[in-house]
Image: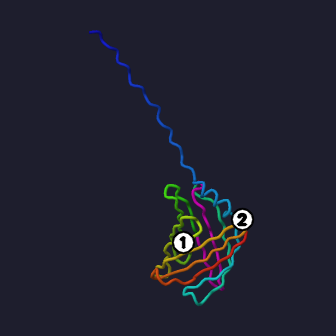
Amino acid sequence: APDAKKEAPKKEEPKKMEAPKPAPELTEMAKGMTGTWTCTGKWSMDGAAWTDFKGTSKMTTDLDKFWIKGEMSMAAGPMKMKGVEYVTFDAGQKKWTRFAVDSMGGHEAGTSMDGKKWEGEMSMMGMTMKVKTSLETSAKEMKATSEMSMDGKKWFKSFEMACKK
């Protein structure tokens, strides 16, 4: 029998790996949030005694535009505080995530389905609390209100802030 010529197997071209891109939802939110904001507000640790504050928040995109980074500084009388937050959108889970830390040892982690209503946990001064935050943004204004709970059942208003570009 004649020798059949065997054809060499074809080499497949290696697939080029494409770098991921930031989710369109994040890009859209960044358009409205980036910039420098001047803020005023009040906060409370118990829902009864309120302390006024003033501050600034500089919002930028970071880490190849996959995160919105906020750098805040505020003063409430003689007390001064700084904080950093990162916000992103996971397109696979269709969910927003936020992490924040501050200059008093506090930290917070939360999630949102729409980027406006957030839920999570915050730790500060040896306590861990549940938090719910509502965020409203427009081209020149941002408003935030927050509630806290030690047990997830009894909630009290803990924070409200209005910012302008």
Assign a secondary structure to mark 2.
loop
Extreme residue toward the top, this view: 2
Assign a secondary structure to mark 1.
strand
Which residue is more in the foreground, 113 or 62? 113
Which residue is more in the foreground, 28 or 57? 28
Q: Quadrant of the N terminus?
A: top left
Give the foreground label among 1 and 2: 2
Q: What kind of secondary structure does the magenta stretch mostly adopt?
A: strand
Mark 1 — residue? 101
Horizontal side of residue 109 vs 55, given as left or right: left
Mark positioned earlier in the residue sequence (1 or 2): 1
Extreme residue toward the bottom, this view: 49
Q: Position of residue 118 (x, y in %)?
A: 55, 70
Q: Residues within 10 Å of mark 2 (few under 14, many from 20)?
A: few
Q: Real-space Cα distance between discs 1 and 2?
A: 26 Å
The range drawn in magenta is 64-83
Mark 2 — residue? 139
**For residue 45, above or below residue 28:** below
Q: Amino acid under label 2?
A: Ala
Number of numbered labels in the structure image: 2
Q: Residue at x 44, y 30 (%)?
A: 12
Q: Residue at x 57, y 82 (%)?
A: 158
Q: Residue at x 58, y 90 (%)?
A: 48
Q: Position of residue 117 (x, y in %)?
A: 57, 70
Extreme residue toward the left, this view: 1
Q: Position of residue 136 (x, y in %)?
A: 65, 70
Q: Amino acid under label 1?
A: Val
**For residue 78, above or below residue 11:** below
